[in-house]
Amino acid sequence: MVKNKNIKAAIFFGALVSILSFMLAGYFYFTAALVNTADNFLRSLEGKAADSPTMYLSDDFKHHVTTSLFSEYINENGLNNYVSANWGSRSLKSNRGSLVGVIQTKDKLLPATISLVKEGEQWKIYSFQIRSEQSQQNEETRQLPDQQTQLLLATDIMAIFIKSLEQKSMQLLYESAAAIWQNNTTVNTLDKAFERFYSENILMFNQVNNKQPIFEHVAKLDGDGFMLMAGFYEIEGQTLSFEQRYIYEGLAWKLVGLDVRLNK
């Protein structure tokens, strides 16, 4: 009886190992294309490959990132001295993928996140983020910008929003948004969404430019990788609250959603 139990246990664990091995093999198989694109892209940064780095970049990446800005970013991080990369975390969901790991250059190790999108039959780089060592502390915060950058993002967008109210057109807000949002909205749609503010006293709204917002919670990532921030301003006894949603696109965080409310 004991022998039969041991045999059954051995069969069970053998089957479990086989299933896990199969899942692991599938995981590496389906994410191999992501790794190949990222590694080929990084090798092209050395300037020794025949391929141009831009051929690996998505249309949305190239929408906001100029050639000079891209070159400056590569040089600042020493990526033209690329040696190798190790991707400890890979994820794939529909036509989007993500790689998180470490890039080795001749001079240093760079914690990095590369997100990819499928354009046609090819995987392309949607965003490229070199992170700080401090961002490695835990899974939840490793991709978030520091608090100072969060503050700058929030105040810059609100300043653009106020300027758009002055002009009675959301053109400036539209131009500052992520390409992925621009592809799914129009200036006219944004005008209709915020037209209730066009009749308000613009001098009151201008006070926002001289204030810092009070955040309702720390910035956080949702399940789709969007960064969420929420806060408010107290102006003339009223509360101007906002919710902002960002995606890391190209080399920076870009706006993909904005909700503003005035509570009198």
Image: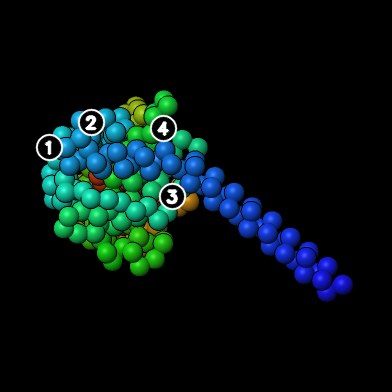
Distance of label 2 from label 1 (alpha carbons) = 18 Å
Circle 2 SS class: loop
**119 is higher (above) or lower (below) than 34:** above
Question: What residue is shown with label 2?
Answer: 51
Quarter of the rendering containing residue 55 = top left
Distance of label 4 from label 2 (alpha carbons) = 19 Å
How many numbered marks does the figure carry?
A: 4
Q: Residue at x 40, y 40 (%)?
A: 34
The image position of residue 89, as x and y in percent, is 42, 54
In screen coordinates, is 52 left or right of 9?
A: left
Marks 2 and 1, the one that precedes in the sequence: 2
Question: What residue is shown with label 1?
Answer: 68
Marks 2 and 3, the one that precedes in the sequence: 2
Question: What residue is shown with label 3?
Answer: 90
Q: Residue furthest bottom?
A: 2
Circle 1 SS class: helix
Q: State the residue in front, 237 or 50.
A: 50
Q: Mark 4 belongs to which amino acid? A: Lys
Question: What residue is shown with label 4?
Answer: 118
Q: Mark 1 belongs to which amino acid? A: Ser
